[in-house]
Image (spheres, rainbow, N blue to C red):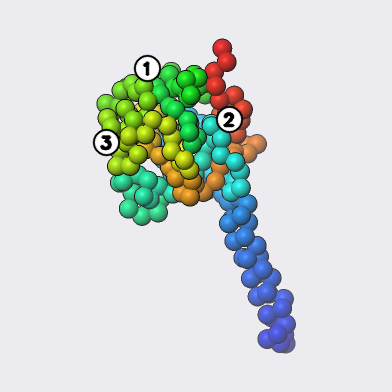
Amino acid sequence: MKTFKSIITSWVLPILIGLALALIIRQFWFTIVRVDGTSMEPNLVNNERVLVLRPSEIKRGSVVVFNAQGVDPAVQNKLDYVKRVVGLPGDTVSAKDGNLYVNDKKVDQSYLPKSEREATNSVNNVGNWDNLSELGQHMNWVKDSQTITVPKGKYFVLGDHRSVSNDSRYWGFVPKDKMFGVVKVGFWTKAEPKDAINQQYLHFFDTK
């Protein structure tokens, strides 16, 4: 009969070590999350599993997961949102008839259908905006509605499914301390959406 000590050594201790390693990996390296909703279609779909890398640098075009509590006024409890970063701290962002401009340079949105690009401005009375202050005041942001540029330590984000996405157009910026990590998809994902998620930051601006 196994002694209590041998049970602890052969079963309990390895399980505890495994759990500790899993927590460390989740906290400092990566975790797997499930996409909840359609706001990133067609590039991420509802219930899709994705990797979230914790230490990754956030760039224009990065797809990120963040805690929307305290960001979206409608969210009262912790809730993860998945969106695409469009504006970094210090950037200007404007949009006209579905075309996005960051620092007065046109953004490559070839990863979206034309109807979703146009929905950037056409849905929910958003309209065109020449600067972020104009957008913030028009949409009655609770915070930072007077700023022309993305504030220090914050980001401007949009969903790819612009006609339904609840994003920075409606409530403003995401603080860095709300960011959980950068989304990556694996080999099982089709080439076009995989490039739109994993590589879009490499060709963020339209060079045509």
Residue at screen point 40% across, 24% down: 94
Q: Which amino acid does label 1 sit on?
A: Asp
**Residue 98: where, in percent of width, then height?**
40, 19
Tag of residue 142: none
Q: Do the residues labelled 3 and 2 touch (CB within 8 Å)?
A: no
Tag of residue 97: 1
**Which dot, 3 or 2, sits closer to the camera?**
3
Residue at screen point 37% across, 25% down: 131
Q: From the viewer's perspective, is residue 15 above or below residue 175?
A: below
Q: Which amino acid does label 3 sit on?
A: Asn
Q: Is mark 3 on a helix, strand or loop?
A: loop
Residue bearing mark 3: 140
Q: From the viewer's perspective, is residue 57 above or below residue 117?
A: below
Residue at screen point 63% across, 52% down: 29
* Label 1: how many Cα within 10 Å (few below 14, some 14–19, many 20+): some
Q: Which amino acid does label 2 sit on?
A: Tyr
Q: How far apart are marks 3 and 2 (CA)?
A: 30 Å
- Left or right, residue 119 beside residue 51: left
Which residue is nearer to you in this view: 111 or 153? 153
Q: Distance between the residues labelled 2 and 1?
A: 23 Å
**Residue 126: where, in percent of width, then height?**
30, 27
Specify the quadrant that holds the N terminus. Answer: bottom right
Residue bearing mark 2: 201
Q: Do the residues labelled 1 and 3 touch (CB within 8 Å)?
A: no
Query: Residue 17 occupies which quadrant of the picture?
Result: bottom right
**Which dot, 1 or 3, sits closer to the camera?**
3
Query: Residue 27 occupies which quadrant of the picture?
Result: bottom right
Q: Can residue 66 be seen in this view?
A: no
Which residue is nearer to you in this view: 194 or 78? 78
Tell me which numbered mark, 3 or 2, is placed earlier along the sequence.
3
